[in-house]
Amino acid sequence: GYYEPLIKGSRVRSAQFSWPIRGVPDDLLTIDLGEIYPDLKKYRLRGRLVGNKVVPYWSRAELDQMGERLPARTLLWASDPIELFFLQVQGSGRVELADGSRVRLGYADQNGQPYQSIGRWLVDKGELSLDNASMEGIKNWARANPGRLPELLNANPSYVFFKELPASSGGPVGAQGRPLSDGRSIAVDPGAIPLGAPVFLATTAPGGERPLQRLVVAQ
């Protein structure tokens, strides 16, 4: 399954909509190591230039402290920081505006900082049991502890930047840049199955023994 979040947002900042959904900053550098070392073609570094030296890009906590000083366009404003956080975790989603229209957002880039699970952080702090550290459990804890929200979110230094995508009636945009199709698009390891390849499934439906045999596409 692929989860595409739907969150509330606005194109105008207000007391209700005060959490920025940011585009890629102008000063974010992306260095493709494969262009220099072919053996490292799967790896990219992200950072920023300070003098003549490339240093790590700002962490989530530092980005939040910078606010409007960050040289990045604010695409939209979200109403709920924890919903925005999970939009970043998923890497794509939709934002519903006050007039009922929806804006589709896709992954544009990331700050290069390592991803850390805030669910694991809550478990390690003794705030949640492992059984309760689900997405819903994390949201419930965040809403019950608003004063500790920055501490929770900043436990994950990774930060995702978005781009606005054309309106589409299809599913979220996959790795090929095309909307995914319900029941027909599958996620693959490109090292084993190339993107765009047709794949025939011969298995059983999830949670049962009903046969599932169909042609799908690696997208």
Image (cartoon, rainbow, N blue to C red):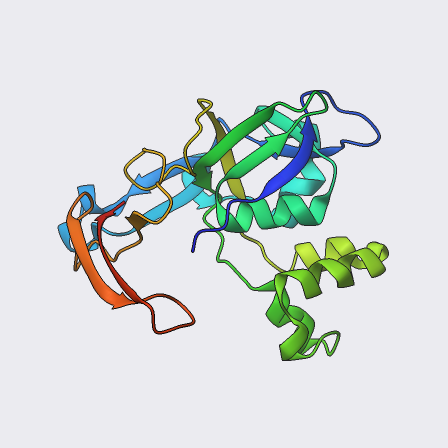
Q: Is residue 213 above or below residue 172?
A: below
Asked if residue 44 lies left or right of residue 8, the reply is left
Instruction: Tell me what residue is drawn at x 64 percent, y 43 percent.
Output: 84
* Relative depth, front residue between 29 and 124: 124
Image quarter of residue 116: bottom right
The quadrant of the image that shows the N terminus is bottom left
State the residue at coordinates (43%, 71%).
207
Percent position (x, y) of residue 187? Answer: 31, 53
User: Residue 99's spot in the image, x, y percent?
Assistant: 70, 20
Quadrant (top left, top right, bottom left, bottom right) of the C terminus? top left
Residue 41 shown left or right of residue 105 in the figure: left
Tell me: residue 77, above or below residue 203.
above
- Residue at 67 percent of width and 73 percent of height: 132
Which one is in front, 78 or 28? 78
Look at the image and tell me whether residue 212 can be seen.
Answer: yes
Compared to 206, does 88 lie above or below? above
Q: Quadrant of residue 165?
A: top left
